[in-house]
Amino acid sequence: MSSERIIYLPLGGAGEIGMNAYVYGYGEQGAERLILVDIGVTFPDMDGTPGVDLILPDITWLKENRDRLEAVFITHAHEDHVGAIGHYFEALGVPVYARAFTANIARHKLNEYGYSPETVTTCSKWPETVQAGPFSVGFLPISHSIPESSALVIDTPQGRLIHTGDFKLDKNPVLGEAWDPELWGEVSKGGVKALICDSTNIFSPDAGKSESLVGPEIEKLVKTAPQMLVATTFASNVARVKTLAEAGARAGRSICLLGRAMRRMVEAAVETGVLDSFPPVIGPEDAVQIPRDNVMLLVTGSQGERRAASAQLARGKFHGIELKEGDMFLFSSKTIPGNEKGVIRIMNQLSEKGVDVVEDRAGLYHVSGHANRPDLETMQDVVNPQMVIPMHGEHRHLREHCKLSDSKGRQSILAVNGMMIDLTGNEPKVTEYIETGRTYLDGSVKIGAMDGVVRDRIRMALNGHVVITLILDDENEPLGEPWCEISGLPEIGRSKAPLLEVLEEDLSQLLGRSKESTLRDDDKLESALIKAAKSTCMAEIGKKPEMTVVISRLS
């Protein structure tokens, strides 16, 4: 009996939505050859990760086993699947494989970091395959909300795996490849050991809707707009951007794209032949010169991003364009959980301008790019795998997907980030737990989530900050009184006196009664100053701020 095994190890995307990174391995235990499927990002929020630019998966384990890694395969060009490729390419140092549209986006990301475009290999769809160590990998077309999404057919010496990536079952997706159950059935007829499957919409009870249903409703809405019309959607949803642009053009409006990401996605679709036609577009400098009722803006920022075009238009002018009372703003998108505050803020700012905001609560102007529960059942029935491993979902999604699989008589396991699963036998088993987490891109520096940088930033934001400076002479005598600087704190406390004056007076009195042993020991002196300052702040303002003490000694 062979001692070689198949392993599956999610480093991101399992137990959360976003930051996808999945490792597959085959070989002797501890010496498996590895491939990585996707390397994405997730986005920070002001509450939990203030000041952070991006959140990346923790790939420490993968870097430690870099000599075993054969290749990276990217299923599609969404940021949560390809967004970290530039940040981690040097650490991984292996070839990257993707289909044409995704490869185009990946190359641009790598180019930003000075890497050659030749590091990405463009692959054709199934039945073409790529050999990577013991793996044979093919890109199997599947419909989603971005062009050229693909599942991966991963063949190993001990069986076939299918990694769905993100998908929906759309037989008329407007742009890109339709769901082809016959092709999927043909690929699966020899037997599939494991289906590693998207779980995002497991709780949606009705079958998913086709992208083709959105166009007619958008066209009706566009005709009702009396003045300038603005629409936002996911920049990567090129099919939706095309639908919006064509609806505007048919209504006699000039189309203006606002936002670098949207322009980049349309350019990539044209460059790779995914998009063979698109209405003519004008620049913002031209948009301000023609009548408002002849203009349609397609803008980024459907998720409330502060720096995107939607937010800037809501706050004031953007590239000289200003929204006015009577304009219409359409959100042709679904708000991702966690982004509600940002989206609602923009909606209220638009409302204050007198702009009519159209949401998509009735499902007229947006359809999801992910498979609903009945579609997940259909996928299982077509592929008929021995086991199902739910991925791409929060814990509750994965758990419910396991229940669905169990109800259909298939083996399943709830595998979250860091759980190494052995897929070799007749049922999946946890074989090891890998320490994993998150890495923050903070400016131009990567920091660990547990490094304390963001934690300290949150504590300063919540509690304020006091800097205490003290100079002592060579006989350990203070030269003058200590002085303080405060940030994020009220200037006047309960005593009605300036907080700075009260702090400095109390610290001066502390020094006057301190023993010689305290004055000559920096650690003891710092501790005493912090304790006294926190006591004063608590009495004056009801808070204990973060403290920084600077002690200088003249020699």
Image (cartoon, grey):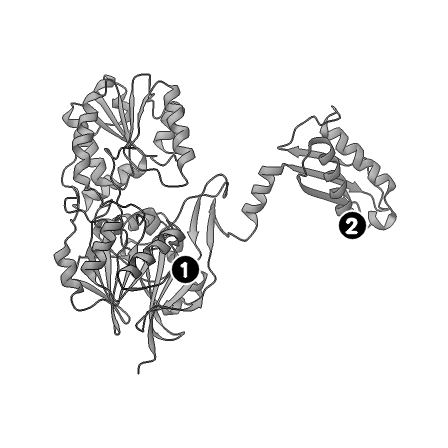
Q: Earlier in the sequence, mark 2 or mark 1?
A: 1
Q: CA distance from mark 2 to mark 1?
A: 44 Å
Name which residue lies at 60% across and 42% down. Answer: 459
Any part of residue 110 in sight = no
Q: Residue furthest bottom?
A: 1
What is the secondary structure assignment of the residue under circle 2?
helix
Q: Is residue 417 above or below residue 464?
A: below
Q: Which mark is residue 490?
A: none
- Eye-nearest disc, 2 or 1: 2
Q: Amino acid at mark 2?
A: Lys
Instruction: Check whether the beta carbons of the residues at disc 2 and disc 1 lie within 8 A of each other.
Output: no
Q: Residues within 10 Å of mark 2 (few under 14, many from 20)?
A: few
Any part of residue 135 in sight = yes
What is the secondary structure assignment of the residue under circle 1?
helix
User: For mark 2, what is the residue?
Assistant: 524
Name which residue lies at 13% across and 62% down. Answer: 186
Q: Position of residue 517 (x, y in %)?
A: 85, 51
Q: Is residue 523 above or below residue 161?
A: above
Q: Amino acid at mark 1?
A: Ala
Q: Position of residue 233 (x, y in %)?
A: 29, 35
Q: Position of residue 143 (x, y in %)?
A: 20, 49
Q: Which mark is residue 91?
A: 1
